[in-house]
């Protein structure tokens, strides 16, 4: 796709910030509206009311100016739908749902979705753990610590977390713990029998050491326009039903866990802060990731990304272990309430607003091509 050629047909004074109606769409739209740009959300029939009704622009209320409702999200790849977006001078902001509802078809995302996209679309595929050049490849090349992995379940010699894509909901992963091969085999047999995942999905599973510590997502923004790395906020996940189990007195947890299927499904996020003494290490890791992404996936990361991490205890001192990378918009709008954006800009700032700031600044200095793919 020739982004520069497409942009020649755009009216840069009439841009529309566009995204898929899920995950972080409202964060994107509110940020764009705050800075005077039009917004459009592509929705799916049966999921449109959030955007068409509850947060629809109405005078000073709302942030979604316009919607396009599809029979199914994957229709976004149809030429006639893309033409509608191009006619509206759309800049598309990708999120994880965009990848999931296009069935993780990264070849189509890179070659068939012919709408200018904020960020580096070539990097989205690193989230797919079955690929050779995935996020762990980048972590390894960056020299960033991540959990020890086991390719053969027979090698499990400690408590491990197993991550497998679910059968019915491909955008969710089935997590379970195992401390040895027999434990692993028992749980796998049960989950295969119950249709939680398939044999094929199991072959793509990640088996990694369970890291004990505090889970923190470091939500960064790399600006190609100003060549600056910014920490916009920190958060942690809320997961069901594991959190409910942990609220039960310990004496009952063992019995309850025998009767229910323990899950780690994401239900939301909590804005948190970290010790100020940890910030320099976090920035150091962020800078290493930016540099490596530029070397391996030129032009590298553009805009928002998250290093999803565990802060471990000493001795000799606390450390950061990265367990996942999100090379796009985070699904955690609450991070705007953390102080880190305020420390830099003198006000709370959302990721959606920071994306729009980058778009407007790139236009101003005639560097639009630096932030799009």
Image (cartoon, helix red, strand yellow):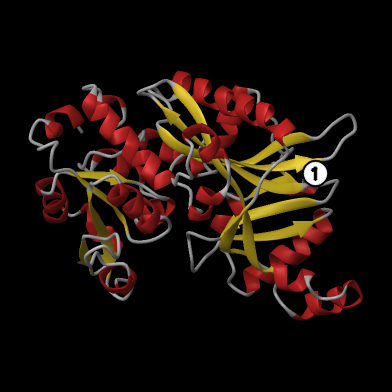
Left or right side of 109 for 114 = left
Looking at the picture, does residue 247 appear above or below residue 98? Answer: below
Q: Nearer the viewer, residue 209 or 294?
A: 294
Mark 1 crowdedness (10 Å alpha carbons): few <14, some 14-19, many ≥20: few
Residue at coordinates 41% horizontally, 55% vertically from top-left?
A: 24
Looking at the picture, does residue 15 appear above or below residue 57? Answer: above
Q: Nearer the viewer, residue 359 or 177?
A: 359
Residue at coordinates 41% horizontally, 34% vertically from top-left?
A: 303
Residue 177 appears in the rendering: yes
Q: Nearer the viewer, residue 76 or 226?
A: 226
Residue at coordinates 59% horizontally, 35% vertically from top-left?
A: 136
Looking at the picture, does residue 249 appear above or below residue 142? Answer: below
Q: Nearer the viewer, residue 262 or 284?
A: 284
Instruction: Name the secondary structure under disc 1.
Output: helix
Q: Position of residue 216 (x, y in %)?
A: 66, 46
Q: Position of residue 243 (x, y in %)?
A: 71, 68
Q: Pointer 1: what residue? A: 155
């Amino acid at each position: 796709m020739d982004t520069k050629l497409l942009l020649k047909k755009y009216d840069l004074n009439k841009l529309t910030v566009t995204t898929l109606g899920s995950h972080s769409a409202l964060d994107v739209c509110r940020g764009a509206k705050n800075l005077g740009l039009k917004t459009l959300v592509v929705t799916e029939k049966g999921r449109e009311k959030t955007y068409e009704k509850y947060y629809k622009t109405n005078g000073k209320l709302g942030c979604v100016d316009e919607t396009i409702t599809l029979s199914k999200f994957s229709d976004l790849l149809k030429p006639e739908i893309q033409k509608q977006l191009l006619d509206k001078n759309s800049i598309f902001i990708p999120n994880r749902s965009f990848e999931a509802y296009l069935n993780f078809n990264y070849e189509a995302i890179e070659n068939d979705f012919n709408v200018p996209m904020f960020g580096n679309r070539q990097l989205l595929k690193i989230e797919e753990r079955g690929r050779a050049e995935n996020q762990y490849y980048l972590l390894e090349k960056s020299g960033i610590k991540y959990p020890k992995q086991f390719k053969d379940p027979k090698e499990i010699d400690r408590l491990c977390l197993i991550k497998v894509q679910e059968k019915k909901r491909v955008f969710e992963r089935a997590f379970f713990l195992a401390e040895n091969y027999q434990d692993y085999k028992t749980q796998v047999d049960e989950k295969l029998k119950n249709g939680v995942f398939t044999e094929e999905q199991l072959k793509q599973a990640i088996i990694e050491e369970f890291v004990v510590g505090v889970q923190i997502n470091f939500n960064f923004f790399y600006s190609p326009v100003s060549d600056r790395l910014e920490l916009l906020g920190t958060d942690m996940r809320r997961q069901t039903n594991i959190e409910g189990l942990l609220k039960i007195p310990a004496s009952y947890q063992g019995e309850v866990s025998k009767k229910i299927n323990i899950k780690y499904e994401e239900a939301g996020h909590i804005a948190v802060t970290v010790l100020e003494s940890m910030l320099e290490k976090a920035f150091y890791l962020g800078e290493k990731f930016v540099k490596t992404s530029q070397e391996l996936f030129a032009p590298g990361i553009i805009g928002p990304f998250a290093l999803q991490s565990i802060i471990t205890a000493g001795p000799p001192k606390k450390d950061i272990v990265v367990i996942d990378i999100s090379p796009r918009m985070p699904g955690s709008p609450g991070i705007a309430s953390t102080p880190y954006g305020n420390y830099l800009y003198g006000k709370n700032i959302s990721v959606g607003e920071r994306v729009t700031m980058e778009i407007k600044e790139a236009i101003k200095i005639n560097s639009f091509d630096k932030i799009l793919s």
